[in-house]
Image: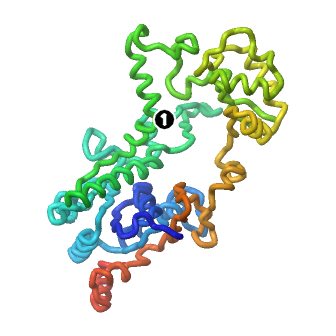
Amino acid sequence: MTVRLLEGVRVVEFALLEAGGVGTVLADLGADVVKVERPGGGDYIRRVGWPFVHGVSLMHHHLGRGKRSVDLDIQKPEGARLAERIIGASDIVIEGMRPGVLTRRGLGAEAMRARHPALIWCTVSGYGMTGPYATLAAHGVAFDAWAGGLKVGTTEQGFTTGELSVTLGTRVTPLLAATAILAATLRARRTGQGCALDIAQCEAAAAVDWLTIEGHRAHLRPETEVTGNPADGGIRREPGPAGMGDSVRYQVYRSADGHVLFMATERKFWEQFCRAIDRPDLLGDRESEEVADHALGDHRLRAELTEVFLTRSTAEWVEVGLTADVPIAPVNSPATLPGDPHFAARTTWLPAEEYGADLLPLPVHLVGDEMARPTPAAAPGRHTDEVLGDLGVSADELAALREAGVLG
């Protein structure tokens, strides 16, 4: 059976660029998401980033899916009144534009929630609604730079550059915001009272990296209070993944055709690995800790393991992990991941033939049922007549509004 978990939940989105990802998550879960866009091209996410598929940015194909599009000029009084009607018919409002844009049109959270007390209003912005950076213009990487996630380096030409595997702030915000929205929805249905949420993409980036940030904070305290892991001799390491550098039993190794991540830091896993490869000599004569033993700084053992892992392919090492119960993971890249057998077994692409580009689905699996698939990303204003018609706007009124430039 095909299931829409949020069937009957109505969302209106006033958002640009990746702030629209909040609506995408809710749409993927089955909510009816109406995206209000300005006439004359709509959200310019269609024209930014790379690559472009059939002349439209891949970002729009992904973030625009599952939504109905209404082109409406809210700067005109008639457009603002229509937007208010759409808001009044909704359970949730997503505001993802510069602060004040809706408020200046009489459509801000305070005014709308006074008229519709159960309304849930979620404002998504780069730096939040308060603080010294609240009005600072930015794009996605800025939020990871703020949160300490951008690795600064130098090119061969001597230019400064920044490296980032994935922009966490803009990717995690939709999940954080959707979680808060759904919690607020449960409360509103129980009490009749909605709320206003303030979600900052920079804070989402920081929240994901909590262990590293909290680790640095902890290291400000005396070493008598905050040490490293006793299994490693109590040596303070760089907080977070950066501290992996001198680990041996939790480390990346080259395989015959790629790389694997070896993670046998528990005594039982280490012993099972040594037996599986018929190398009991690697156990050595030192007493291994039961858990969290990284064999930190044991360069002799690291050299041995380097040679060992070169003897088999990545797939063969994963098979060792499965049969001997040892944590060994394949190291994929975004380009190679789709060829991984586990990815292929659990992931069904939203196909380009229907969606304009091959898209990753929301990774939520229902046991015994199937998640309903979202609709493809819409052209600007594709559903204007449909949405406004549901609000009682007649065909003659639609024609007059178009004549006045209120609708595209």
**Residue 327, picture quadrant:** top right
**Mark 1, residue position:** 149
In the orientation shown, which residue stands out farthest toward the front?
368
Give percent across and percent down for residue 273.
Answer: 74, 27
Q: Nearer the viewer, residue 389 or 27?
A: 27
Q: Quadrant of the C terminus?
A: bottom left
Instruction: Judge from the rendering whether residue 383 lies leftward or rightward of residue 298; answer left or right.
Output: left
The quarter holding residue 4 reads bottom left
Q: Amino acid at mark 1?
A: Gly
In the image, residue 340 lies at what x, y percent?
A: 71, 49
What colour scheme has been applied to the protein in the rendered image?
Answer: rainbow
Report the residue at 48% width, 61% height from top.
63
Mark 1 Cα-neighbour bin, 10 Å: few <14, some 14–19, many ≥20: many
Of all residues shown, which one is farthest toward the left? Answer: 114
Residue drawn at x 52%, y 64% is 371
Residue 226 percent location from the top left of the image: 43, 14
Q: Secondary structure at mark 1?
A: loop
Residue at 47 percent across and 74 percent down: it is 379
Q: Is residue 81 above or below residue 92?
A: below
- Relative depth, front residue between 264 and 99: 264
Tag count: 1
| x then y, percent, for residue 301 | 74, 17
- Is residue 349 at least partly visible in the picture? yes
Residue 120's place in the image compared with 274, above or below, is below
* Residue under the image location 60 percent in, 69 percent down: 54
Left or right, 163 with reference to 139 = right
- Along the viewing direction, whichever of 191 and 78 lies nearer the viewer: 191
